[in-house]
Image (tube, grey):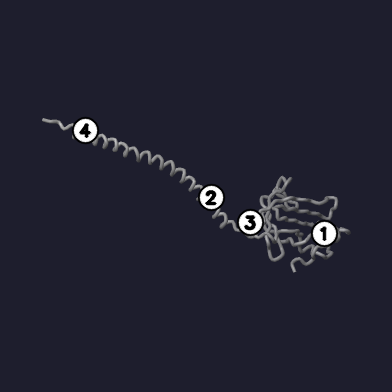
Amino acid sequence: MTTNHGSTLAVLLLTAGSVISGCECADRPVLAEVRDTSSTGLETGASDGVTAIGVEASTTSTSEEPVDVSRFIGVFHNENGFVPLGEEVDNPGDPLLVNIEISADGTASMTMETCNELLGTFEVEWRWEAQPGPWLEFSPGPGEESLRFKAWDDLESLRLTTVDDCDLKFEVDGHLSTYETFRPGRACWVNRCEPVWTVEIDYCEGEDPTPCD
């Protein structure tokens, strides 16, 4: 029997080629999978980061709408029914003269005086943040050890809100003041309880006496 070496060699080469080709095909998906996984991992991470930032920015812009604080900016004085502004009345018992000044830079301050000049001027510094309502929420300012308002200290919360086109009211530890409002303009003593049974408070010189008319 004659052996056909050419045919045999061709068969062997084809078989070897198929084996080699089969190995390469088996290996390629593995390599491709590794590369794809690595590439996909990086791309997915970057995509997730962008998406997260985009969602956060979108949420912030829709949920935190700007609060108009223009009504709060300026100087305001306290008023109550016992000491009407511009009228000399009987001393109702240690009346208070309180002025607050609120700046657009997020800071605010308060000064308070009583009939007793020896006590001097009581001063408080605050920082404020605008809240929907609108409200201004106060926190202790520079040099303050606690949140204070008038004679109170160590307060848990202090907020200020608008009442009408002119008045502002404070909420102290969750309780809204019902007897005292703050109106635009700085107030000064006209009669600081001399004699002690009378008192008068009015706008300081140069202040507009009709800021809300």
Counting residues from the start of the chain, the first of labels 2 and 1 encountered is 2
Q: Tell me what residue is drawn at x 78 percent, y 54 percent.
A: 112
Q: CA distance from mark 4 to mark 2?
A: 65 Å
Tell me where residue 5 appears, x and y as whole percent. 18, 31
Side (left or right) of 115 relative to 20: right
Q: Residues within 10 Å of mark 3 (few under 14, many from 20)?
A: some
* Mark 3: secondary structure: strand
* Mark 2: secondary structure: helix
* Mark 1: secondary structure: strand
Q: CA distance from mark 3 to mark 2?
A: 24 Å
Counting residues from the start of the chain, the first of labels 3 and 1 encountered is 3
Comparing marks 2 and 1, which lies closer to the viewer? Answer: 2
Q: Amino acid at mark 4?
A: Leu
Q: CA distance from mark 4 to mark 1?
A: 116 Å
Q: Residues within 10 Å of mark 2 (few under 14, many from 20)?
A: few
- Specify the quadrant that holds the N terminus: top left
* In contact (CB < 8 Å): disc 3 and disc 1: no
Residue 161 in view in this figure: yes
Tell me where residue 45 appears, x and y as whole percent. 48, 45
Side (left or right) of 118 relative to 38: right
The circle drawn on residue 131 is 3
Q: Tell me what residue is drawn at x 19 percent, y 33 percent.
A: 6
Counting residues from the start of the chain, the first of labels 4 and 1 encountered is 4
Comparing marks 4 and 2, which lies closer to the viewer? Answer: 4
Q: Determine the image quadrant of residue 204.
A: bottom right
Q: Amino acid at mark 1?
A: Cys
Question: Residue tagged by mark 2?
Answer: 53
Counting residues from the start of the chain, the first of labels 3 and 2 encountered is 2
Question: Residue tagged by mark 1?
Answer: 188
Outermost residue on the left side: it is 1
Question: Residue tagged by mark 4?
Answer: 9
Q: Residues within 10 Å of mark 4 (few under 14, many from 20)?
A: few
